[in-house]
Amino acid sequence: MSKVLLKGNEAIAEAAMRAGCKLFFGYPITPSTEIIEYLAKHLPEAGGTVLQAECEVAAINMCFGAAAAGARVMTASSSPGISLKQEGISYLAANELPVVIVNINRTGPGLGGLGPTQSDYFQSTRGGGHGDYRLIVLAPSKAQELYDLTMEAFDLADKYRNPVLILADGFLGQMMEPVLLKEKKEGNLPPKDWQTDGCKGRAKRKIASYFLVNELAEEACQRWQAKYDQIKEAEQRWESFYADDAEYLLVGYGTCGRIAKSVVLNARKQGMKLGLIRPITLWPFPVKAFTSHFDGIKGIVTVELNAGQMIEDVKLAVNCRVPVHLYKRQGGMLPHEREILKFVGQVFNLPVRGEA
Amino acid sequence: MMDKVLLAGFGGQGVMFIGKILAYAAMLGSLEVCWIPSYGPEMRGGTANCSVILSDEEIHSPVIDQADAGIVLNKPSFDKFLTRIRPGGVLVVNSSIIEMDKTRDDIEIIAIPAGDIAHEIGNPSLANMVCLGALLPKLKLVSLDKIEKALDEVVGKKKPELYEWNLTAIKKGLES
Amino acid sequence: MQKVFGRPKGLTEIPFHYCPGCTHGIIHRLIGEVLEELNIIEDTIGVAPVGCAGFSLDFFSCDFVGAAHGRAQAVATGIKRALPDRIVFTYQGDGDIAAIGTSHAIHVAARGEKITSIMVNNAIYGMTGGQMAPTTLTGQVTTTSPYGRDNGVAGFPLDLPKAIATFDGAVYVASVSVDSPKNILQAKKAIKKAFRVQQAGLGFALVSILSTCPTNWGMSPVDSLKWLQEKMIPVYQMGEIKVAEEVKGL
């Protein structure tokens, strides 16, 4: 298998096609647009359809219909567009419909800018729309991972009957890297014995989330909660990088996760025992990563492209037993390795050599 | 080993394109590579830039603070990126249209009249390729034969005549 | 004994929950009969709205999906694109299709989406207790137009079928009423044609049906029918508003 050079957004689109996604409903918005453009060009050749919807709201509800009919379906957008989709995403969660949603985060609030940002962490990990629900949230950090996780997102969505969100930024979406185009793994997925595709030879089915009896509504909430607990137990993912003997930890995902790796390597050259936890699932948050590495840890710095959102989950994960600091850039700016290391030195009173 | 390269010029001068050629050359040589465009409104007129990281090991941070090498095709790019080359690094300057009103003595500056050379070849739009040729000997990880393969991959299949033009321009840059 | 009247196979055994005198029940029955007569119950997926017809998904014997408010036609688009050989229809109130979901109404028509939409126009928001709808008549009193709908403040009643008929992709548009036996028969004909348009894959079909809401209008069922005839019918363009050339042969 040879590698091809793809933009991150193209890697997402290519992976979706190879995962068997035949339908894409979307609305163009920078910096996610290459996804709909790539699929518009290539999906018809694969026997699928790209329908450019009249609005983001239409797109997510078209996904709702296609998923109810049993199809593998995806939509992609960027932050303001994802905000518009939130009602539909809430309905997807309530009706337990497997849809893959991509958010190539742009800066907010408002129209914002196009630079790399992680300002939608709360929106992504707390549900996002109305009601008490969760999405499985995947946070890739390079083109190959965008490809691999997109492909897997479809299986996770089918396995748990839950919408899956892929959260990346414009930097990852626009950056080109070599990607190995792996084929889909044949998984053992549950049959879609709930899909509404016409009741030939069986009893009629309905897909709805409307309760006028509170007892029934509570029962549904408990069923969803049990599913979320199961996901929390089974699907926490992270990468540990020099974390085993670390005295200080960086925590960063996506673009920050890979920048932080360079910081760790620089720190180690200076004899500083710095490690990294890179969350790959943002929901469920990889709490287990911290319990397994906790003993020798003296302090943590989260590196985020927002005002400090993931830091709350990190503090919960370590029960606030060690100091947790935030190093942040906002508005589409990325931190350099040396400014992060300098900050680590400052907050923990550690010597940092040279200009770094 | 790593080559961190910045490329900048007016939109339409083919900055993204030389970035892509470098990226393909690296990939065909089984190197790790990261091609990062400036995007959004910057794409529509004004200064365009992209950066390419070539490496023989995994590329972690894709953020280039100080580059090993750079090509600037116009004056605004020269002004913006002169300070972004690390001490000991190299900057190729299209001297046909860039008046170097400042300089640095801790980096190597290769001033090449790329616009004029491209004009002599008979295709003024190839200044980018002339500069790429001039930069090639300074890169640790990419050589002419890989660039030839990349050119073949990117343009050769669709437009064989463009392949020849581009290769001629690169060689002119190499020789000068 | 010969059975001369029964429940159509297109309806389930579940009793309607609608208020006394409400004409949703008549419209449900007509659709149930059409599904049976065209023999498409097992091929059909219905999409229910938010509003009084939110529970209609229990009443029809085909598969059914409950959409968010106003989004039934977008959901139907997704189903139809996934399963082009099935019959997909939406059942929506006037608030659902002609206010919060109007963008989809326009775009399914413009795209010629091969679905059938049934719009029930009773000039009021029923489920939430009688608020002004886009279709509320000028001067009509509702809980959000307590002094009567003032055109200067709240604009004019929206005649959606008339607008939809202007789009190339809409091949059959009709506006009917269920206020009398004669009109009920007309309504059924229109509904049946709208489904046959989809069977033939010709394009988008819309049937708007004028309906009563005695509870929120504050009238007896009989007075409600009279009010519909005297006040509503003159405001809305009635009959087959658009029958495209290719539909005429059906």
Image (tube, helix red, strand yellow):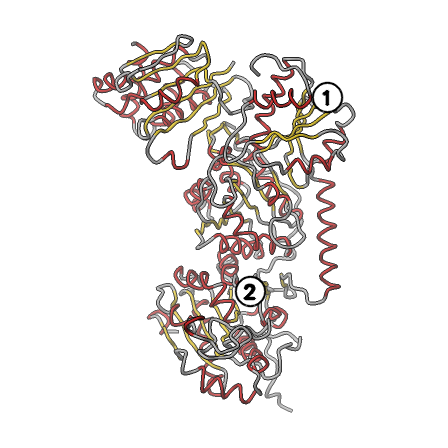
Q: Viewed as shown, does residue C110 lie left or right of A304?
A: left
Eye-nearest disc, 2 or 1: 1
**Amino acid type, residue under disc 2 in the picture:** Ile
Looking at this rendering, what residue extends furthest in the right direction? A295
The residues tagged by marks 2 and 1 sit, at their Cα atoms, a distance apart of: 59 Å
Circle 1 Cα neighbour tier, 10 Å, few/some/many (<14 / 14–19 / ≥20): some
Instruction: Say if A79 sits above or below B151 in the image.
Output: below
Name the residue rendered at 39%, 9% in the picture: B108
Is residue B144 visible from the viewing direction of this image? no
Q: Which residue is mark 1?
A: A247
Is residue A79 visible from the viewing direction of this image? yes
Q: Which mark is residue C10?
A: none
**x, y (%) of residue A346?**
64, 21
Q: Which residue is mark 2?
A: C45
Is disc 2 placed on a helix, strand or loop? strand
Image-quadrant location for residue C173? bottom left
Q: Chain of mark 2?
A: C
Instruction: Say if C185 sits above or below A74 in the image.
Output: below
